[in-house]
Image (cartoon, rainbow, N blue to C red):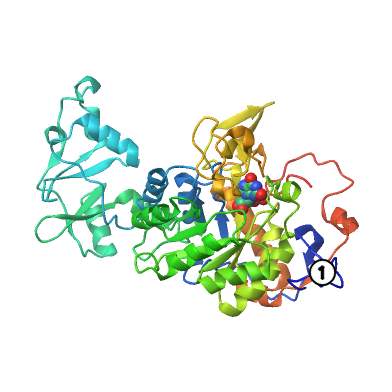
Amino acid sequence: MTDQTSPADPFGFLGLTYDDVLLLPGYSDLAPSDIDTTSRLTREISLKIPLLSAAMDTVTESAMAIAMARQGGLGVLHRNLSIEDQAQQVDLVKRTQTGIITNPVTIGPDATLEELDTLAGQFRISGFPVVDLENKLIGMVTNRDLRFTPVAEWATTKVDEVMTPQPLITGPSTISRDDATLLLRKHKLERLPLIDPDGRITGLITVKDFVKSEQFPDSSKDGQGRLMVGAAIGYFGDSWQRATALIEAGVDVLVADTAHGNVRMLIDMVRRLKTDPATKDVQVIGGNVATRQGAQAFVDAGADAVKVGVGPGSICTTRVVTGVGVPQITAVYEASLACKPAGVPVIADGGLKHSGEIGKALVAGADSVMLGSLFAGCEETPGDLVLVNGKQFKTYRGMGSMGAMSSRGKKSYSKDRYFQAEVTSDDKIVPEGIEGQVAYKGPLSTVAHQLIGGLHQTMFYTGARTVPELQANGRFIRITSASLKESHPHDVQMTVESPNYSGF
Ligand code: XMP
């Protein structure tokens, strides 16, 4: 396959997608415990499971990002919200399930219980160190302390009237995990504040987070033990401010989120992010592209990974509205021709319908996959459950749909994803996506279990112990539409729904 169609044969370049191919079975001598799905996300980050949740406003906000990182994948926070709100979402993830919270939210002794309650709701946390003006620890206050004061008195009661004052059990800033566990157990503590020799607060350990970090052994964590999170950025208007605000909030990966990434302004922005001393340490993913040349431009700009997909998504109408796109298996393969020699990982974004397509994407040249529709039905995605004819659904819409790009209800921040930043009137929008719904599927943990279970089986059938082995040894066979019919259940009426198959 080649990136260039030949002038002599303008239709010679054949594009294939997931349903056009299968993987050949191979000799296998593996026990289930041998299989390791760890894969590279970027030049510097590896994930235990090669799954990303899409940067879409019906898929990834903080709850989904937390769930994804706990499972060992990564959530990419969407950008259809203000810079401050998106940065706060990063902060919410970073404050969750960490071994040690290094910059705990604190409160002053003169704050009212009403302010305490607001702060608890804003950060979704239940206990705060109380500090004086020099940041010295003078007490601890929790939601529980609120319960003993009538709500009518919250506005006039101050934190220092209800807090547990010093002396408290505290630990030194440098405490080890084992010593902290001993202290928490010995004193049956919910929270252990950490202080420096001058009594200033430097950290907080909560027993809940300690237990959680044991429950999620595969979770994706940064160097400080905090959950990892990605966030989407554009390249128009205030995108640089967005990128720097996200970095300040602690984001691990910035993900260029645009339908067509092979544009000068974005490539320049990626180059600037990877060279500016203030931003160069954060991982930056370029995209979306669907050709070798598009991927090469991001490799040359210093991107840490390249995301591939123009029009394969379940809610996308880009290919029919514009006539442009590349079938996804071919697009991933073409991009990998530019990325592999440079050691830059590839992300296959969109178009996956079943778990078997994860392995196909990896063999075609991807290192991880980004999923929208397969995750949109999870409990942790934004939006309420909708009941239709007794069945539960969740809303799922394209970021290029009318709903996401119009000002219907609220301001749209992501129109530039579709080159329409300057369109001011809703009736002038040219959508490239649709709005719909998907069946409710329960918690992400069960959905991810089925998807990764499918990948495990792919690796067993192909005899691959690791993802690099699968990538190196996996072989495709091209199939016909008759074979595709044979692949799916046929000639039987399905009577019981399967957790990993909902139909053709
Ligand atoms: P799936 O197939 O997993 O696809 O639901 C998710 C991916 O689709 C992209 N996306 C869009 N593409 N119009 C498009 O052409 C849209 O409105 C749209 N919204 C999302 C995006 O790359 C996402 O990760």
> Which of the two residues, 432 or 361, is positioned nearer the viewer here?
432
Identity of the residue drawn at 25% across and 48% down:
191
Q: Most extreme residue toward the top, as rendered?
A: 152
Left-right relation of 284 to 297 = left
Picture layout, residue 264 above or below residue 146: below
Q: Most extreme residue toward the bottom, as rendered?
A: 341
Q: Secondary structure at mark 1?
A: strand
Left-right relation of 172 to 49 = left
Residue 276 in sight: yes
The residue carrying pointer 1 sits among few (fewer than 14), some (14 to 19) or many (20 or more) residues within 10 Å by Cα, namely: few
User: Residue 26: where, in percent of width, then height?
Assistant: 76, 74
User: Residue 294: where, in percent of width, then height?
Assistant: 63, 67
Identity of the residue drawn at 82% across and 52% down:
488
Picture layout, residue 221 above or below residue 447: below
Identity of the residue drawn at 58% across and 53% down:
448
The amino acid type found where label 1 is placed reads Ile
Query: Circle 1 sits on which residue?
Result: 477
Left-right relation of 76 to 341 = left
Q: Residue 291's quadrant in the figure?
A: bottom right
> Which of the two residues, 37 or 248, is positioned nearer the viewer here?
248
User: Residue 496: where, in percent of width, then height?
Assistant: 75, 40
> Which of the two residues, 141 or 117, is positioned nearer the viewer here?
117
Q: Quadrant of the N terminus?
A: bottom right
